[in-house]
Amino acid sequence: MTSAISVDDVHFAYDDEPVLRGVSLSVEQGAFLGVLGPNGSGKTTLVRIMLGLERPDAGRVELFGQPAETFTDGTRLGYVSQHSTDADATMPVTVREVVTMGRYAHAGIDRLNDADHAAVDDALERVDITDIAGRRLSTLSGGQRQRAYIARALASEADLLALDEPTVGIDADSLARFYDLLGELNDEGITIVLVEHDIGVVTEHASTIACLDGELYAHCETSAFLESDALERAFSSVRVANAHRPVGGD
């Protein structure tokens, strides 16, 4: 089976400041990958490169067997970025309108047919937000907005769902339901890539883990990761930096 994502010896820098150094990994179709590492470790950059949203300085990236830079079937990809809920919180659109956007790549804005509307209805039902479909996005909680974005990806018939710290600001009850939903989608065959700061949550739900801090310290099944020293090695630079900070420093 062709991998959903293949990353081969990727290097990336911002203004000559290295962010990723020789990262290689493969995400199989149907996998649930958790991406872990300290702040500034390159997690968000890696995900954006995986999706073809950033070009690496060196190395090769493929999406479903095609070079990421020429991959054109965006309907197969769903992405919820780190700050999307904040940026879109004041958009004057309803939940249904947001989810309907997922059909535009299939039919165009003005050519939606009954099948497209049925796909939107199905996506709303699958993430359990049919009852708030008519509400403005700006009136929703963080957890409800995240569900709307996932429904948009489902309406587009995405095969791969990437989420970058999607649970910031979500209450505990919504958090449990959110991860139940991700598990259900993964069980249905959707590939999931999750960046999350809560290590315990990630290792509880993800089947494989990628742990990095500029370089990749581990990419393996979760059970093997928990038995390794990868997490300690990835976060050791943070402890060293903190040990040299002056008392009372930021």
Image (cartoon, rainbow, N blue to C red):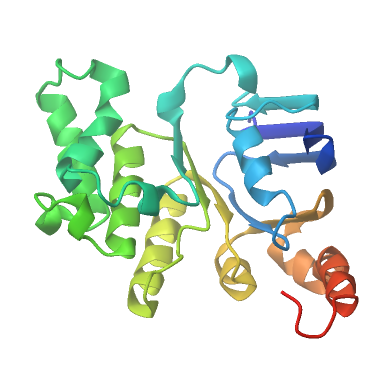
Q: Is residue 136 left or right of residue 5?
A: left
Q: In the displayed structure, would residue 121 be above or below residue 75?
A: below
**Residue at the spot x=19%, y=47% of the render?**
95
Query: Which of 12 and 173 lies nearest the eye of the viewer?
Result: 12
**Residue at the spot x=38%, y=54% of the render?**
86
Give the image location of residue 164, x and y in percent: 53, 52
Give the image location of residue 100, x and y in percent: 21, 34
Query: Which of 247 and 8 lies nearest the eye of the viewer?
Result: 247
Residue 153, quarter of picture: top left
Residue 225, quarter of picture: bottom right
**Residue at the spot x=29%, y=52% of the render?**
89
Q: Quadrant of the C terminus?
A: bottom right
Query: Which of 127 and 144 lies nearest the eye of the viewer?
Result: 144
Query: Which of 180 and 150 lies nearest the eye of the viewer?
Result: 150
Q: Quadrant of the N terminus?
A: top right
Can you name the residue that lies furthest to the bottom here? 247
Q: Is residue 13 left or right of residue 119?
A: right
Give the image location of residue 107, x and y in percent: 23, 17
Q: In the displayed structure, would residue 221 be above or below residue 121?
A: below
Q: Is residue 206 visible?
A: yes
Q: Is residue 67 visible?
A: no
Residue 244, quarter of picture: bottom right
**Residue at the spot x=27%, y=55% of the render?**
127
Give the image location of residue 149, x and y in percent: 33, 46
How many labels were placed on the picture?
0
Q: In the displayed structure, would residue 167 be above or below residue 100?
A: below
